[in-house]
Image (spheres, rainbow, N blue to C red):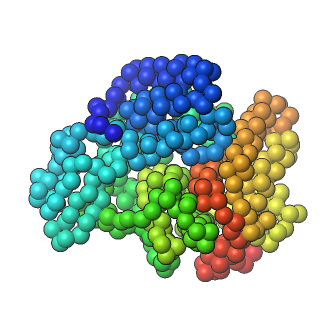
Amino acid sequence: MSHRNLPSGRLGRMARLAALGARTGASMVLSKKGDGAAQQAAEVLGSLRGLAAKVGQMASYVDGMVPEAHRDAYESALSKLRAAAPRSAPEAIRALVERELDAPIDRLFAEWDDEPFASASIGQVHRARLEDGRLVAVKVQHPGIERAVESDLQNVSVLERMMALAGPSTLETKRVFDEVAERFREELDYRLEAEHQRHFARVHAEDDRIRIPEVIAARSSRCVLTSELVEGLTLEQAAVRSEGERRAWAETLWRFVFKGNLVGGRFNADPHPGNYLFRDDGSIWFLDFGCVQPIEPARRKAALELHLVALAGDSGAFPAAASAVIGSRPGAYEDAAVAYTRRCFAPLFEAPYHITRSYVASLVDDARDMKRHFFSKTSGFVQMPPGMVLINRLQFGFYSVLARLDVSVDYARVELELLGEAGLMAR
């Protein structure tokens, strides 16, 4: 895509989104496939970048977010937002890098490519070479993105769309909104992202299937993050490889997510396809650690117990273990939430399991349906606990990626293996 100035004012961004809603609504009525609406959405959300573009990114790959009749059109159009959003001008990027790292580009890097090889919602990525010859990927924030994100955070309609995958808790206002806002503000601090990246590298250091690029601290700052340059297949390319290759990659993805959660105590809440590069040996490069949620020890312990119950196939103990994680109380809402959680754990209870796009879409529908309990005074409805608001964003996004690999996997065996390695099998 071409270079584009970033609209950062709240009213301007709100007006563009409002106009998009009107145009796409008409297009979806008039077009059987919704192609016009999809292209318009990609154009507007891409030019806005920030949280607005993240809405488009999620709609491009999370099954169930877009009506079935329009899914293919939206997925095709919005997939561009995962790596090819409109780019910031080279001179603006150079100025930002030099200001952040306090030196001219030609002193910071032996080679610098002005044309980014990827551009997304918060920043764009440039190829460069260090003085010692190493090739690096330099992620640079779009100039003005901080103001744009703040504008989006003041726009309730954007946050509501961002939180559409957060389940019933989206009906609470201040606490949930504040928690989501905190996570997205953190994405603007690449120093924090670098720390998360190093944390995940330590957690997975002994696993040669899970690869995390090295952070180059001397060329990183709050708005610039330099890592070793890595290569691999995209999800679209991986999805057409052999069944054995796809199964190996699905196993690696499961290890990364649940070792990160249950052993490492943090979950990466941004599992979109552009964050994975697949290698022929079954390993995967994992990228982008901007949206990471720490898991408090007590909740991690409860989550581990829930996984152990599922791995044991203990349906009788599952409701109590699920309730402990959800923080629910007896009533219709707890019954629905436990049943929904049991469906999410089907890959462990029913292993080997084939995660499909229709299965993921049904989970999204179930999560939306649970919101009806909010309006009943007798349902026992409770808000999602602090620290758990973005868990469904991980769940749906991660399962949608696995669904694209389209293969049956013994996820229980994979998880038993990783928990055994960590010494966490005792209950």
Residue at 74% from the left image edge and 45% from the top image edge: 362
Q: Residue at the location (27% across, 36% down)?
A: 3
Please tell me which residue lies in front, 248 or 18: 248
Quarter in which the N terminus is drawn: top left
Q: Does the image show residue 238?
A: yes
Residue 387 horizontal side relative to residue 212, left or right? right
Question: Is residue 21 visible to us here?
Answer: no
Q: Quadrant of residue 110?
A: bottom left
**Is 210 situated left or right of 7 in this image?**
right
* Quadrant holding the C terminus: bottom right
Q: Is residue 179 above or below residue 286?
A: above
x, y (%) of residue 50? 41, 37
Name the residue nearer the viewer: 387 or 359: 359
Q: In the rendering, at what x and y percent does residue 293 appear?
A: 53, 54
From the viewer's perspective, tell me whether residue 276 is left or right of residue 144.
Answer: right
Whole-percent x, y for residue 366 in the image: 75, 42
State how many labels appear.
Answer: 0
Nearer to the camera, 79 or 272? 79
Relative to 242, say whether 272 is above or below. Answer: above
Q: Looking at this rendering, what residue extends furthest in the right direction? A: 316
Instruction: Give the residue displayed 34% in from the left and 28% down from the top.
Output: 7
Residue displayed at 31% across by 40% down: 87
Q: Position of residue 426 (x, y in %)?
A: 72, 78
Residue 234 drawn above or below residue 97: below
